[in-house]
Amino acid sequence: MSTLTGTGTLLRFALRRDRVTTPVWIAVNALMVLSMPNTLRTLYGTDAERTDLVRQLQTNAAFRALIGPLYDTSLGGLTAWRVGVFAGLLTAVTSLLVVVRHTRDEEESGRAELVASGAVGRRASLTAALLAAGVANGVVALLVTVGLAGQGAAGALAFGLGLAATGMVFATTAAIAAQLTESARLARGLTAAVLGAAFVLRAAGDAARSDGSSPWTWLSPLGWLANLRPFAAERWWVLLLFTAAVLAQALVAYALAGRRDLGMSFLPTRPGPATGRLGSAAGLAWRLQRGAVLGWSLGFFLAGVVFGGLAQGAADLVGDNANARQIFERMGGRSGLTDAFLASMAGVLGLIATLYVVASVLRLSTEETSGRAEPLLACRVSRLRWAAGHLTIAFGGAALIMLLAGAGLAVGYGRRTGPVLGACLVQLPAVWVIGGIAVVLYGLAPRLAPAAWGVAVAVLLIGWVGPALNAPRMLLDLSPFGRLPKLPGGGMEWGPVLILLALAAVLTATGLAGLRRRDLTG
């Protein structure tokens, strides 16, 4: 039997399983990219404004590190500069999630063994996972190419292909990690660590040189995406670097897949102690989620340091650009520009924290559907105690990462520690509301629990893209973040904060009541 027998069937099954989550990630990425030309036309509509932007970027290494160098001042070039790094990160995250879900996740749950008992080749599941990631990246490339074709067909094609190629590089990285580790969480963590290292290398290189020629930049696939230079005399040969990386990593993944037993890994799982040390459901929840909490905490602290360091340069970068100033004011309030920048960055970190709280809450769903919750609940552990352990990690972890984000902002900014910490902590009621919605969906309709990701992504889009598109206030207020006071600089309003806290409590209680009354689905 061929090692690829059954690949087509597994691919169709993978696409069917991802029919909700993957299109959401694709839509977020495409909307972020395609909304930029109109926004940038408003921000930098004159040659003088664009010339001033180039001058500021040449002298501001911090902003180059965050966004990258600018190679062309056309609308297409500005779009590739403004969202290239972030769109590349999104395609990479989408790809690694798809590949790990259809490889190591399937083995860990035992479903891969059941599938392998049929007429399925040894490498069919890995091939189907990579093809599913390829379909997702291909759709992104098509949408970006068609949507930006009006800015220049060659540049649009280069940008679309670059994003897809970036996604496939990290798809094959995830394929290797899935062979090395016995845990899906560890496979995702290792791939995310590689992605983080790629971002740091690119940031260091772009901070050092404004033309993208630093060796550090060339060590990162995200740096290759920028050096492809869409809309700026495209360097098509850079695509060969992506191709070589994808092929080399795919060969390694296939070689590893052929040398191990199903369910096994090359990095053995460390055995636990001879005598168990976990005495409560909360202790087990912490043991299961501590890696995610620590990873998010470190990431938010470092992001806070970076954003805080950019605060002083925000006024210089915006300069006299009234439109850019208005965007910061819509996101961060009508205080001074530096305060508005800090408030908008705190808001962005709060929006991203919704992804953490949803992932942490839905760990309950993972434990239930995998069958691990049922033996635990068969003992003297009530459903509420079991759920409370995970929800404590979810809601308490959100508080921790926002506290560390505020500490990072204060360290990077170098002053006003109290107001900066308050700006981050005031985001928590809105984050907890999204967590409460995830609890309601899981408790009342567990099959709809993944829809919590859609809620988090919608809130992220409203808060991130809405101000740049000058969205109506009615739309912005649909997000709980639109009700929060804009700190620092603005006045503290306790009414909306208390209402959101009460709403989060009601939603959580409703979800727990539903969990207590329904049957388990595992």
Image (tube, rainbow, N blue to C red):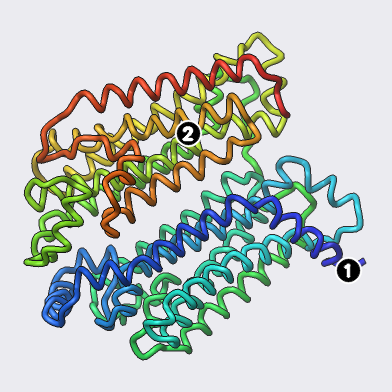
Nearer the observer, 487 or 223: 487
> Which residue lies most toward the top here?
380
Secondary structure type for disc 1: loop
Point 42% across, 43% down: residue? 295
Q: Residues at badges 2 and 1 in contact (C-beta under 8 Å)?
A: no
Nearer the observer, 26 or 55: 26
Percent position of residue 235, x then y: 42, 88
In the picture, the quarter occupied by the C terminus is top right
- Which quarter of the picture shows residue 284? top right
Q: Is residue 485 left or right of residue 402?
A: left
Please tell me the numbered disc located at residue 290.
2
In the picture, the quarter occupied by the N terminus is bottom right
Q: Earlier in the sequence, mark 2 or mark 1?
A: 1
Q: Is residue 78 left or right of residue 509?
A: left
User: Is residue 493 shown to the viewer in this render?
Assistant: yes
Other-residue count near label 1 (Cα within 10 Å), few / some / many at <14 / 14–19 / ≥20: few
Point 82% across, 67% down: residue? 4
Mark 1 belongs to which amino acid?
Answer: Ser
Which residue is denoted by mark 1 in the rendering? 2
Secondary structure type for disc 2: helix
Point 53% across, 53% down: residue? 24
